[in-house]
Structures are given as structure tokens and as C-alpha cells.
Amino acid sequence: MHFPFQNSYSALPDSFFARVAPTPVAAPRLIKLNRPLAVQLGLDPDLLETPEGAAILAGKTVPAGADPIAMAYAGHQFGQFVPQLGDGRAILLGEVIDSDGIRRDIQLKGSGPTPFSRRGDGRAALGPVLREYIVSEAMHALGIPTTRSLAAVVTGEHVIRETALPGAVLTRVASSHIRVGTFQFFAVRRDTEAIRRLADHVIARHYPELVGAERPYHALLAGVVARQADLVARWLLVGFIHGVMNTDNSSISGETIDYGPCAFMDAYNPSQVFSSIDEMGRYAYANQPRIALWNLTRLAECLLPLFSDEQEKAVAEAQDILGAFSDQFSAAYQAGLRRKVGLFTERDGDDALIQDLLDAMAKNQADFTLTFRKLGDAAVDDSADARAQFMEPATFDEWAGRWRARIALEPQGATERQVAMHAVNPMFIPRNHRVEAVIQAAVNDDNYAPFEELVKVLAEPFEDQPHYAAYADPPLPDQRVLRTFCGT
Ligand code: AMP
Ligand code: MG
């Protein structure tokens, strides 16, 4: 079994990581291999499906060329700074260059303790592993930058949480696992040389167009600001709630990372929170842009020593760069909303028209996903399915009248509009009740058929897939999931 590793992070100074091998497990069994992703990474999917492959994906054997490390990082967790976190239950095997020429980390999550485990066991339970597999791959299919899932294995061992649960390992693929918290780890240690090394590594890897720029570190901050603004706009446009936007869960490459108690909302509610540990609603749906900017401000603080020796000058420059976030986010979000309601052009009053729809959706507990999807059908047909999402359909009718008058000002035909709307408004999202049902079947009955089917449906979220129409349905009242857990 050959992995074409070309490791770069483990060549950085020793303070960046701890060398540590995965801890072997009793009886690894492959639950799921993402075959197309394996091919993209230059790996042989048939070999990965052999017992030898499963042993590697479970951390039982370390493949040749791997240089296993746990990465060091710090982070603000719910606003509280923790100077040392680090990979407590994840081990980076190494990096490969994929078929697009992009360097990708291959990381095992749940593969045993590391020097950063603190009081944790270094393990992962099957439920959270399946949740991350499902949601990260769904995000990818929705076109949202994200870490990917290459494989899930059960370990044949139990992990002790509130009860004994089957243990599992997720193989996670990322364009890197460098976080805002990685910079914070060195900033709190006042190790400016390490910050510079890390920044240079990040620029070469994620922002190569900035190599040789006049002010590369300023440009780096601007680049991360732009990618995070775009990312959070994309989250909002599909109803995604990350749930734990701590600075250690905030990726420098602009990918969605560290799926814990994340969830997609069913009924539109800007203050929606699912995570059981988010008691104050810090990471509620509509707070996410504000929190992203807060996290970026923490990143900027780390970079100040690279900006200028004069503190005041550095701060002013950082503030200037951070100031772009708000407009960048709003532009991406409003443009996305215009696409969602089928507007090809921009006119005065559009933002208000769209906001009125969102307000009506919130008041009427309209399903976020289905309202927009069915609005696409309303472009060619009557509005029956769209208005059915509203508790008081008359509210929708009033709005729809204004919407029809607005779209009539554009030359595009009805079918063209429907096609464009369906290309941005998914039919299928990983609904919480579906994810829960899949996890229950796997954990309680060792039945992975529901998992397979859900993953398959979510791979084509913009297709109608009439055979799987039930997967588009919101939960019935007794199926509603009110809380999600990180399960660590
Ligand atoms: P997370 O909630 O997954 O973002 O993790 C936050 C921090 O806790 C990271 O430093 C993790 O490595 C660590 N952590 C989470 N679960 C465990 C565990 N079971 N064993 C050791 N460390 C863990
Ligand atoms: Mg994390």
C-alpha cells in the first residue's frame, strides 16, 4: 500500500508539533471508503478496502513515508483563551499532492492519545465520526469549502463517554489543518520567528500569489479575511450552523473545519442554536459573521509583530484590513440571496424585498431549504408548494406578488430562472433527524445501510432524485432534533 507522501509541516521547527504514532486498535473494520476522493489523492481504493488498508485507516499500521505528528495550537474557546490545545485526538500522517496539484493533509481523527490530549482519551465515538463524514461530504457537494472525509473505520474497541460506545476513526483530508489558534500558540509565547515561519508556510501553501508581495503578511491577513467572509456567507445561504466557531476551529485556508455539534436549520430562525454547550447562543446562526470577524481580529493580533515595529502603526494597518470584512461578507451574502430568489440583475429595493421574505419565513416557521427550492418551481408554475411552507400562506402570497412583479422586469424566461435557482437552492441537506436516525442504526444495530443511502442522496443535493423525495422532508414534530452534541 503506497501513499505518495510529500510532507512539509513536519519539516518545520520542533516547536510546531509533537512526533507521535497512532495507537494500534483491536479489530479495525472499514465502514466507508470515499473512493473518488481516494483516487483524487493518488491512492488505490481497492487496496484501501483490504484488511491492510483498514489497518492503516485505523492507525494500526503506519504506511511508509508517513511522518506522524500532532500539531500544536492554542485557541479561544467560547471567548476564553487556552494557551495550549493541540491535536489531542488527531494525528497527521502526512501530505500528498492531489490530482489537482493541491497539497492535502491526511489526518486520522480518533487514533489515540498525543502529548496534547490533556485529560482526553484521544479517541472518537462512532456517532460523531459518522456525523462528520455525512456533513463534511454534504458541504462539499453543496460547493462549500470544507475538509473532506476519506474513510471511517470502527476500531473494535469501546470508548467511554456517558456510556460505552463503539470507537471509530475518521480519516480527514484538508488543504491544511492550520488554524487561527496555530498562530495564537506562538503569539502567546512571544515567538515572533515562529509566527514568521508559520506565515511563510501558509503563504506558500494557501496564498502562493502573495509570494514576493510587497507586504506579504498584510496581504495574508487580507486573504484570510476575504476567504472567511466568503465562507460564512456560504454557510448562511444553506442554513448551516457550525456550532463551535472557536479560534482553534477556524481554518486559515478558508475551509469549514472541525464538525462537532454542527447542524442545518429546518425552519428559518436567525437565532437558531443546536449545540448543547452553546448556552449563550454565541455561535447562533446569524451571529456567525460577527464571530468570524472576532476570530480574524485574534489572528490580526498575532500578526502585528510582522506588520511593523511600531505598535500603533501595526494596529492601524490591521484595523484597516479587518474593516474590509463587513462589506465582503455583505456582498457575498446579498449576491447569494439574489441568486436564491432568482434575480439576474440588481435593482434598488432588492435587498428589502429579500429581507421581507426572510422576515416572513421567520414569522411563519417556513422551512429554509424548501422555501427557496419551491420558489424555483414557482418561477415556472404556481406557488402552491412554496406557500405551503408558511403557517399563514397569505403572507407568502403578498410577498410573491411583489416578487413576480420584480422578476417580470428581467428578460430571462421562466425555465431559465428555475434552472438557475435550482442550481443554488438544494433539494437535500443533511437534516438533523436523518443524521440522528443513521447514527442510531449504526450504533445500536450495526446497520450501515441508512448511512450509505443518506451519503448517496446528499452527494447530489441539487438534483430532484424523486425516488428519495422523503429525504427532503422536514422533520415531523416528534422527529425534531433540538440539541446536538460534540460527543468528545
Ligand atoms: P474539538 O471540540 O474537537 O474542536 O476539540 C477541542 C480540543 O479538545 C482539541 O484540542 C482536541 O484535540 C481536544 N479533544 C477533544 N476530544 C478529545 C479526546 N477525546 N481526547 C483528547 N483530546 C480531545
Ligand atoms: Mg477543534
Image (cartoon, rainbow, N blue to C red):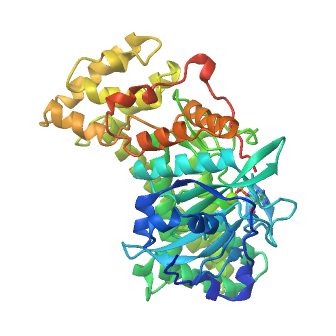
Q: Quadrant of ligand 1?
A: bottom right
Q: Residue at x 48, y 51 (%)?
A: 137
Q: How many marks?
A: 0
474 to the left or right of 336: right
21 to the left or right of 222: right
Work out whether 32 lies above or below 112.
above
Q: Residue at x 22, y 38 (%)?
A: 419
Q: Residue at x 57, y 41 (%)?
A: 448
Single out the residue that lies furthest toward the front.
51
| The one of 140 and 380 positioned closer to us in this rendering | 140
| The one of 155 and 330 positioned closer to us in this rendering | 155
Residue 116 spot, x, y in % from top left: 80, 69
Residue 326 spot, x, y in % from top left: 50, 54
Work out whether 149 lies above or below 375.
below
Confirm whether residue 219 shows in the render. Answer: no
338 to the left or right of 17: left
Single out the residue that lies furthest toward the right.
119
Q: Residue at x 37, y 40 (%)?
A: 337
Residue 180 spot, x, y in % from top left: 64, 67
Residue 5 spot, x, y in % from top left: 52, 81
Work out whether 184 lies above or below 419.
below
| The one of 180 and 36 positioned closer to us in this rendering | 36
The image quadrant of residue 388 is: top left
